[in-house]
Amino acid sequence: MKKITIAIDGFSSCGKSTMAKDLAREIGYIYIDSGAMYRAVTLYGIEHGIFQDDRIDTEKLKKQIADIHISFRLNPETGRPDTYLNGVNVENKIRTMEVSSRVSLIATLDFVRKAMVAQQQEMGKAKGIVMDGRDIGTTVFPDAELKIFVTATPEIRAQRRYDELKAKGEEARFDEILENVKQRDHIDQNREVSPLRKAEDALLLDNSHMSIPEQKEWLTQHFKQVVAD
Ligand SMILES: Nc1ncnc2c1ncn2[C@@H]1O[C@H](COP(=O)(O)OP(=O)(O)O)[C@@H](O)[C@H]1O
Ligand SMILES: Nc1ccn([C@@H]2O[C@H](COP(=O)(O)OP(=O)(O)O)[C@@H](O)[C@H]2O)c(=O)n1
């Protein structure tokens, strides 16, 4: 069967990674969480004094960007890929509110995007990949055979993220998460480089009232249709 490229973009916390990972596992494709890469750069910045309050020392980060190596390795316990920053597993550290509150500013920087996009395109060279993010269908893989743009109401998205953090036993406040979700959507949609928008040829999915199995079924059907053509 021919291998294709699948691009899943959309708003924060709506279930993109969940559906992308599940599909990739089922069809034997590689899954890449591009957001995890921006989160890893942000964590690097926090750990290397790049932030002074809310200001970013862009010159310092620019000098160090070539020293930031991000990779993914399958976690045999979860069956899902964990994110590694310079050889260290940072999967949990990159999901904290501290990182969430800073990542979208880091993702506005053109030299950061350039470095990440180059790595992402390299990872997808051989096709057979599902990648989720904000600019996958528009910038990273504009020729992807299947493009999806996912959305849900901000309240539902914040609730999903809140439930996730609570289930992991982490501190979480619903209002803080809702504010973060809205703020990141705003920054992502209004930045100059590769702003978040639906590619013209992407299929729109509002999963506000869909369960995880329902959305996976929806995606699998579209995948089957594209590979059958
Ligand atoms: N349709 C859904 N209904 C309820 N919860 C969902 C649904 N899709 C995903 N989730 C949950 O919402 C949270 C955010 O999903 P995630 O896939 O990380 O979103 P994204 O990649 O878009 O940020 C996760 O805890 C996930 O299990
Ligand atoms: N391809 C991408 C992926 C993420 N990002 C940025 O990285 C942030 C974190 O991405 P994410 O996919 O982990 O976000 P969640 O929706 O999973 O919380 C987003 O809010 C964007 O600012 C981006 O700019 N481009």
Image (cartoon, helix red, strand yellow):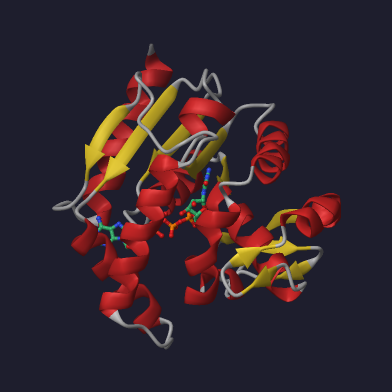
The quarter in which the C terminus is drawn is top left
- In this rendering, the answer to whether 3 lies above or below 18 is above
User: As drawn, is 53 to the left or to the right of 88?
Assistant: left
Q: Position of residue 127 (x, y in %)?
A: 61, 27
Q: Is residue 7 visible?
A: yes
Q: Position of residue 34 (x, y in %)?
A: 57, 47
Q: Is residue 78 visible?
A: no
Q: How many marks?
A: 0
Q: Residue at x 80, y 59 (%)?
A: 60
Instruction: Pick the residue in front: 114 or 204.
Output: 114
Instruction: Pick the residue in front: 44 or 223.
Output: 44
- In this rendering, the answer to whether 39 lies above or below 203 is below
Q: Residue at x 36, y 50 (%)?
A: 186
Q: Residue at x 35, y 30 (%)?
A: 198
User: As drawn, is 228 to the left or to the right of 218?
Assistant: right
Q: Position of residue 8 (x, y in %)?
A: 42, 38
Q: Position of residue 65 (x, y in %)?
A: 80, 52
User: As drawn, is 67 to the left or to the right of 228?
Assistant: right
Instruction: Pick the residue in front: 4 or 90.
Output: 90
In which image quadrant can residue 177 be found?
A: bottom left
Q: Residue at x 40, y 28 (%)?
A: 147
- In this rendering, the answer to whether 180 lies above or below 8 is below
Instruction: Pick the residue in front: 18 or 156.
Output: 156
